[in-house]
Image (spheres, rainbow, N blue to C red):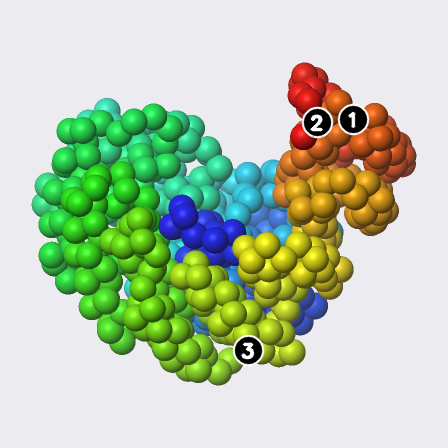
Amino acid sequence: MNATSSPVMRAARIVAAATLLLAPLAPAVAATSAGPVAWLPAASDADVDRAFATARAEGKPVFLYWGAVWCPPCNQVKATLFNRPDFVERSRAFVPVYVDGDKPGAQKIAARFKVSGYPTMVLFKPDGTEITRLPGEVDPERYLLTLTAGMDAQVPVKDLVRRALAGQALSTQQWRLLAYYSWDTDEQQVLPTAQLPATLAGLAAAAPASDGALRDRLALKALAAASRAEGKPDPAGQAAGLQLVDRVLADPAAVRALADVLVGYADGIARHVAVDNTRRELALRWDAALARLAQDPSISRSERVDVLDARVSLWKIASEPQPLDNAKREQLRQEVASIVAGATDRYERQAVVPNAASVLAEAGLLDASDALLKAELPRAVAPYYHMLGLASNANKRGDTRAALDWYEQAWRKSEGPATRIQWGAGYVGHVLELTPSDLKRVAAAGNALVAELAPRGETFYERNQRSLQRLAGKLARWKAGDPARARVVAGLQGKLGRVCGKLPARDPGRANCAKVFQAQAAKPSSPAV
């Protein structure tokens, strides 16, 4: 996924890029349960345990889908994959489990299986052994081939990596699992993040020469991982990477087969493998290849938005240090309008509209982005998600008042405990950033957030816990060296402590709650700014 996309686009795409229909929270579970795929809703360990018991009794693997109502790529993957007759038919061979991240207890399940980003799709053996994490960004036909390979697999991906690097022979299906593994949602279950570039490069070198497509996919993913790694790139690796990219871009069939990588990582890879004029020339060649891809009738509207997002990043490279010219912006405006007009289903629009608005904003078309988002608010599946885009646009303009108003509205109108904690913490963080001297507003926002925290163990797991700890870090930096600010933070810490105290002593959630501020307390203070 494009590492330089806006926060809204990154949130929608970093986990995975795909597209579809997801009904509002309460109807969503009922609809998925009664629909063609016999989803088993899970919101507790007991629900998950029952699903695995069914899997063992029936000798089937378990397919776990982790999503959220507001999440654009979750809507996307359901629209283009889960409603397909061939996927529905394939689902008869596994136990499909749906975990809505905003259901009570869902974050505890997330901790159990190490899932975080929405959407995440994991395939397990009946005994609970994880086989593979499936990508949402590839086209449905390739996804189904990968799913079949996972269901037939006798060896988990973690072991396949070790065997491949040791020179042991793997079947074609096993290599497919490695090439299409969802490294973006791995959560370091297979590899530590720091080892990813070298390991993927090693797998690409070890892959069968007879299957160039799989080798190229692994090699491009290695470049994508390297582009995110710290440190200076290796010149020899850069030269080889540029040669690989050029060869792929020159082949329209390869561009279509590798579209998810070429679209999702265009900016990062281009900046990694080339510099100066070479980079600008590469950006132009890459853009031409994506322009041809955009004409392919087989790609979805949401994928077309992703292509536009990648093209905008390439246009910026080609025009640096100058901004985009008006001709490019007008072209983008027209293409976005055409895509959005074709999205008539309100759930498909939950995937298309916010991402299209984000692309407009990335090109500097803030007014057009605002107009698109505001027009969608009355009919959106999750309008509070669109409000984050409006807040981001106001922030870019330097309109602090409007930005904070939209951030607060997004939080106040959001639904689901995990989303409310995450966005509430985000709102308080923006108050700290944009109005650091307004102690009254900081205290009011922080107190309102803490007052919402339910005294239950599942409140302090995974996304919830991370959101609160990030906020604690911001508060620690904000208060440093200032007694008045320190009193505000102490008050919030005291209120949170009282929430923690209501949890049973042996509940792991109580320890998690107590840790929210502990990590910050151990760090040395720095002067207030």
Q: Is residue 79 left or right of residue 286?
A: right
Q: Secondary structure at mark 3?
A: helix
Give the residue pinned by disc 1: 482
Compare residues 346 and 187 and report the one nearer the observer.
Answer: 346
Q: Which mark is residue 123?
A: none
Residue 374 to residue 449: above or below: below
Q: Which mark is residue 346?
A: 3
Instruction: Check the picture and name the quadrant holding the C terminus.
Output: top right
Residue at 11%, 56% in the rendered image: 250
Q: Position of residue 447 (x, y in %)?
A: 84, 44
Q: Secondary structure at mark 1?
A: loop
- CA distance for labels 1 and 3: 49 Å
Residue at 56%, 58% in the rendered image: 397
Q: Are marks 1 and 3 in contact (CB under 8 Å)?
A: no
Q: Position of residue 433 (x, y in %)?
A: 66, 42
Q: Are marks 2 and 1 in contact (CB under 8 Å)?
A: yes
Residue at 87%, 34% in the rendered image: 491
Q: Is residue 224 left or right of residue 475?
A: left
- CA distance for labels 2 and 1: 6 Å
